[in-house]
Amino acid sequence: MQTIRICAVAVSLLALQAVSLAQGNVPPVVSTGGNSGLDYRVDCNNTFVQGTAVTSVQLDGSGSFDPNGTPVTFFWHNECTGAWFDDPTSPTPVYHVDMTGSCSRDCWIALRVTSGGQTSIRGFQVFVEDATAPSLTIPQNVVGIFGDPTAVGATGFATAFDNCDPAPALVHDDVSVLPVGPGQPEERIERTWTTTDCSGRTTQGVQVIELVAPTGDVGERANLDFDPQSCPNLYTTGSAGTVDVLLLGVPSFRADRVDKLSLRMFLGSNPGVTLAPQAVFTRDLGSLGAVNYGDCNLTSLDGIKDQRLRFQKSAVDTLFALGGVQSGQTVEVMVTGRLINGKLFGTRDVVTLQ
Ligand SMILES: [Ca+2]
Ligand SMILES: [Ca+2]
Ligand SMILES: [Ca+2]
């Protein structure tokens, strides 16, 4: 059995030698490593530096070989302006293509593989194309009070980034509707942001801006008092207990006609996260003195019922994500709710963290 196997190995070695002798010294075989026949077809992956744009393409000629088994060496020859190799003698160089001002480029390359004194050459192309739509980050949805400014300067800009275009176009288009009926805002703006890259690919996103009815006429809109004990309002994180927020009744806004279960408090910068009060007390607790948000109010009673909204401090801390807010910074707090007739309203105050 063992004798037979040794004989088989000897025979195959002889066969290999015979093939090699028959071939003589044959030229090396070139493999460009392309993903599209010999060619490379790649998506733009620009690095943008100081007004320039460069895409980098990993080439791989390591599949090249010499049938005689002699070692191979490489030389990559670039025939494209504004393109270069990090190392033209590497089996696996990175090819850099200057894409400044272009969305697609087509570059010729020749790969020379040398072995045993013989050289083989293959030409191929690198196609850089833009196959990816730009990414879009739209600003947060907004809940505001009717009359608030709604220009992008007030409600936030979108940002766009593209793999190929250093400055994809960015526009917005507003559709404004005035809904009717209980529980509806006074105005709803659907702001569609559209970004378009240099190859015409687009990405869209919709920001919703809802404006609810104010709680009173000018001067009466400042009827929310986050902390009736202090003006400006101050808030310290981390302590236990409760926060009593005062919603003052004014002649044009009857606070005792509020549906208590509908009341929600949130940060103006984050209307998606809301907090319901754990308790609401209705009685005459003070009177409006404020003209602007954050002003002082009066402890004197005016015969108009008010609402005291009690929140857990720990919940307020979490709601405001106050760990990330620095001491001395001011945040806008909003309260929205419905009147018992279904009308949606909103009011606000400003609070300084300490
Ligand atoms: Ca693109
Ligand atoms: Ca106050
Ligand atoms: Ca009152």
Image (spheres, rainbow, N blue to C red):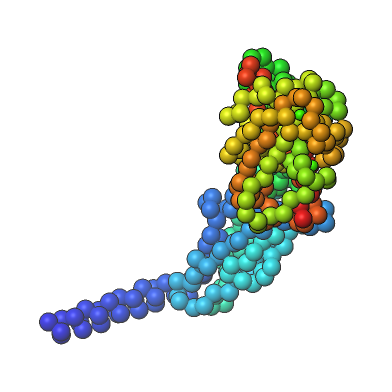
Quarter of the image for the C terminus: give it.
bottom right
Picture quadrant where residue 298 is located: top right
Residue placed farthest to the top in the image?
A: 180
Residue displayed at 83% across by 56% down = 50
Residue 6 locus on image (x, y percent): 21, 84
Residue under the point 62% across and 54% down: 240
State whether residue 127 appears in this view: no
Q: Nearer the viewer, residue 139 or 179?
A: 179
The quadrant where residue 153 appears: top right
Q: Is residue 6 left or right of residue 202?
A: left
Locate residue 272, reporting x and y percent.
63, 38
- Residue 11 at x, y percent in the picture: 25, 79
The answer to whether one can see residue 85 in this image is yes
The one nearer the camera, 295 or 56, is: 295
Work out whether 214 lies above or below 107: above
Between 120 and 145, the one lying in front of the other is 145
Say which residue appears at 53% left-offset and 53% top-offset. Answer: 35
Left or right placement of residue 301 versus residue 140 in this view: right
Task: Name the image quarter holding the N terminus.
Answer: bottom left
Q: How many marks?
A: 0
The answer to which of 267 and 205 lies nearer the viewer is 267
- Counting from the top left corner in percent of width and height, residue 253 is at 75, 22
